[in-house]
Amino acid sequence: MGRPTREGTAVTGFRTFIDTFHARAAATPERDALVLLSESGGRLRPEPVGYGELAALVRLLAARLTAHTAPGDRVLVLQSSRRLFAASFLACLHAGRVAVPVAPPGGRGHHDERIAGIVKDAAASCVLTGSAHAAEASQLLARAGFTGVTCLLADRAPDPAEAEEAPHGTVAVDPDDVAYLQYTSGSTREPRGVMVTQRNLVANQEAIRTALDTGPASRFGGWLPLHHDMGLVGQLLHPLWLGTTTVMLTPQTFVKAPLNWLDTISRYGLTVSGGPDFGYELCLRRVNDLQIAALDLTAWRTAVNGGEPVDPVTAAAFADRFAAAGLRPEALTPAYGLAEATLLVSAHRPDDRGGAADCGVPVDAEVRIVDPDTGAERAPGQTGEIWVRGDGVARGYWRRPAETAATFGARISGTGGTGFLRTGDLGALDPAGRLRITGRIKDVMVIAGRNVHPQDIERTVQQVSALFGPASVFAVPGEREHVVLVQEVRARSHYNIDLTELAAKVAARIGDEHEVHTAGLLFVSPGTVRRTTSGKVERAAMRRMFLNGELRPLHQRLDAEVERLLSAGVRA
C-alpha cells in the first residue's frame, strides 16, 4: 500500500478522503465534527466530538491496527458507538487497511449468520469493536470457526508507548486501491462486498456536493445506520469531507419516536438531512399537529428522500403537512443511488421543474436506459434497466470476478459503449435527462402477460387499514406465477378485529386496483417482514421464508395450488 507520508500529500499526488479530513481537523480542531444524541431521562443529551479530538483518536487506533495487521488487510468495523464507529472507519483509511463496516451483533440468528458470512467472504484478519460487543463478537467468531481473527478494542485506554507510536502521517495509497468493502443487502449466506476505491469515494463526495449544493456552512444530521452506504457516505463522511458538523440520532431513537428526527432538525438548524421514503411516511403517521406547531423547519433546505422507491404521494403529503412548521416544498429532494456507485447517482434539484416523481439529472455519472435482454439502448421516455458509468462506480465485487464482469462490465449493443454498471433497477430518462425509477428487475412479476411491480401493490394495501405495518409482495412458482402478500398487523390490534373480513377487503382492493388475484395472503406480527438497514423490503428473503415454511401467520388464506406447492415441499 505504500509508506507513510506527510498529511495532505501522497506519492501519487492524489488527495484522499483521510488526508482531506486531517486537513480540516488541523484548520479547525475545536469545531464540532460530530454531535451525538443519546436518550437519557426522556431527553436527548448531546455529546460533542471536536475535529481535533476525533483526529487524535483516529491516529491512536491507526497505531493499534498497524501493530496487529498488515497493509491491505480487511478490518471489520463493528461498533454500536457512533463515536467509535467514525474513528475506527477513519483509522482504517489512515493506516491503509480496508474497512468493512457491519452492523453490531444483535443476538438474531440471521444477523449473526450474515456477520460470519462477511468475515469469511472478506477474509478479514481483524475485528475492531468496543467493550460493549467484545464478548459477543469473540463468541460469534469462535462459533463460526474464525479463531485466527484478532479482536481489537477501540475503547481500550492506550499505553504510553502506543500513544507515542501513533502515526501522524497517513499511508500513501493509489487512487484505485480499495478503501472499504460495502456489503450489500441480500442473502445472509452469500453476502457480496462492493469494492469502493479511494477514487470512488472522493469522486462521489464531489458529486454529492454538486448535487446538493453543500459547503462548510451546511449542517447535517439524521438517524441512518452508519454501516449502511447512505448513513456512512452521506450522513457521516460527507460532512467530514466539507469540514462541517453532523448531528446524529440512533436509528432506534427515530423508530421509537419519529418526532425526535424532526425535533433535532429544528433545534440544531440542520440544513441537510434525509432518509428512505418509509421514514417520511412514519413521520406523517406518528407526529401530531400539536407537535408540528412546536417545530421550526425553516432551515431544512434539503430533505433527501432515497434508499428505496420514492412515493410522490408521500413526498407531497409530507411537504403539505409540515409546511406549518416552515418546511418549504422545494426542500423535498428525491435521489437515486446504490452501493455499487458508492452512493449517489442523481438527485432532484430545487431549481429543476421536473417534479417530485423524478430523481433529477445524474451528477458526474453517465446514465443509459437499456433493454436488459438485448443490451440495446432505449429512447428517452422508454423504460429499461438503468446502466451507470463514472468515477463513482465501484471496482466490482470482492473476490467475485464472474459477477464483477457481468455486473460492472456491461456493453451497450451496437455502440461500443463498455464498462457500465448494471444496476438491476428499472427506470426512464425524460427528454431533459431527468431519471425516473419504476422498479427492480428481480422484483417484477409477470401476471397475465403484464409486468406488475410489487411495491405498487404494497402501497395500495397500506391504504386499506391504519393497523398495517410493512408488507412484502412476491410471486411463487406454478403453472403460472402466483402473487403472495405478507402483511404485518400492529401489536395487539389483531385481537380486536375480524382478520378474515380484513383479508377479504385487502384481496378486493388489490383486485380492483391492479387486476391481480392474491393467491396467498398472510397477516403476521410486527417485525416479521425483513427490511434492509435503509428500509428496503427484502422480498427475496420473504419469498424464501414463505416457501420454507418459516413464517408464523396470525391469519392466512391460501389458494389450493399454493397449498399444494407448500405441501410438496418446494424450497427456495
Image (cartoon, grey):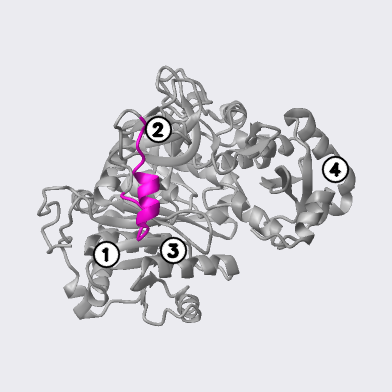
Residue 65 percent location from the top left of the image: 27, 71
Q: Is residue 398 magenta?
A: yes
The residue singled out by tag 3 in the image is: 81
Q: Is residue 472 visible?
A: no
Asked if the residues shown at circle 4 and circle 1 are in contact, with their CB atoms under 8 angstroms apart, the answer is: no
Q: Nearer the viewer, mark 3 or mark 1?
A: 1
Indicate the amino acid at tag 4. Answer: Leu
Chain part drawn in magenta: 395-413
The residue singled out by tag 1 in the image is: 97
The residue singled out by tag 4 in the image is: 502
Could you give the CA–CA distance between mark 2 and mark 3, rounded to whole angstroms? 31 Å
Task: Determine the secondary structure under disc 3.
Answer: loop
Indicate the amino acid at tag 1. Answer: Arg
Residue 129 percent location from the top left of the image: 40, 70
Give me the disc on residue 346.
Answer: 2
> Which comes sooner in the sequence, label 2 or label 3?
3
Q: Is residue 278 above or below residue 225?
A: above
